[in-house]
Image: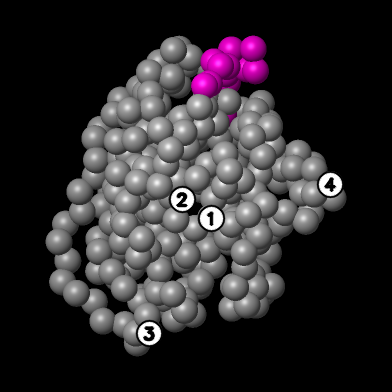
Amino acid sequence: MQNTHFTLIGAPVDSGMKQPGCLMGPDAYRVAGLADMLRNLGHEVADIGNVSPRAQAALPHSNPAVHHLAETVAWTNALSAATPADGFPIFMGGDHSLSLGSIHGVARHASRPLFVLWLDAHPDFHTPDTTGSGNLHGTPLAYLTGQPGFEAFPPSPMLSSGNICVIGARSIDPAEQAALQATSVNVVDMRAIDEHGIAAPLRVFLAKVGAAGGQLHVSLDVDFLEPNIAPAVGTTVPGGATFREAHLVMEILHDSGLVSSLDLVELNPFLDHKGRTARLMVDLTASLMGRRIFDRPTRSY
């Protein structure tokens, strides 16, 4: 990756789930040295601070489980508005509901077909109507592909479901599974990874992005990773990507030259151990931005 201008956008979103703590995520990335790492790789970096949404009146919903709907809508509007028209934005979260706004903003400015790589234990394909938990961090991909039930939100960017790949899935609710089967979203679960490796399906998807002349948004959820290497997440699911699998994904993404924006989501520093997960997420970002194995510092935990 040649010299790139990165914009760091703090998204202290804590409304998409019930376990508090993700609002501390942006500052944890700052303390873990995200900006310095990018500068040391030769890039320009501007940290615009944390986005602050406007207050919004309460919004009722027919599903009584749904909570913090008005706050999540406000965050969606604020993060979309904060997305720069050029450069490479990195959204530092914050729970995964921030992607409702980050990808909405990226789609507004996209000059080429937009593709999304969703690195996550969950496909996040619920709608406000189907969610049983009421946690809106489980809804972004349904919203972004124009599924019904998001009338309170700004108009969906209506991404083609065939432009989305979920890698690392290992927790899919029946309602999500049924909805996904009616789409062209490519879901690569951990069994497929166990059988075929993580590189092969990723390269197939990247070839599709390249053939379309597309640009790629990557949304990296902490729970994509095996919990024993990344404990700071409220939605731990055993059997995630290993340290090497995760770095390999990032190295392949770097080599593709297709990535143009990034979410770092679901980091809950309250659940971390001496900043271990925050540092790992920064190290993974470094691999995405071009740091090679022999440049990697030795970590002592």
Placement of the N terminus among the 4 image quadrants: top right
Residue 63: image tag: 3
Distance from Cα at disc 1 to Cα at disc 2:
6 Å
Residue at left offset 40%, top offset 15%: 39
Relative vertical location of residue 179 with respect to residue 23 in this rendering, above or below: below
Residue at left offset 67%, top offset 52%: 239
Q: Quadrant of residue 45?
A: top left
Q: Which residue is mark 4?
A: 196
Q: Would residue 73 be found to the left or right of residue 164 on screen?
A: left
Relative vertical location of residue 236 with respect to residue 284 in this rendering, above or below: below
Pinpoint residue 11: horizontal percent, then vertical percent.
Answer: 31, 46
The span picked out in magenta is: 288-300
Badge 2 amino acid:
Val
> Mark 4 and mark 3 in contact (Cβ < 8 Å)?
no
Residue 66: image tag: none
Foreground tag (4 vs 2): 2
Badge 3 amino acid:
Asn
Badge 1 amino acid:
Thr
> Mark 2 and mark 1 in contact (Cβ < 8 Å)?
yes
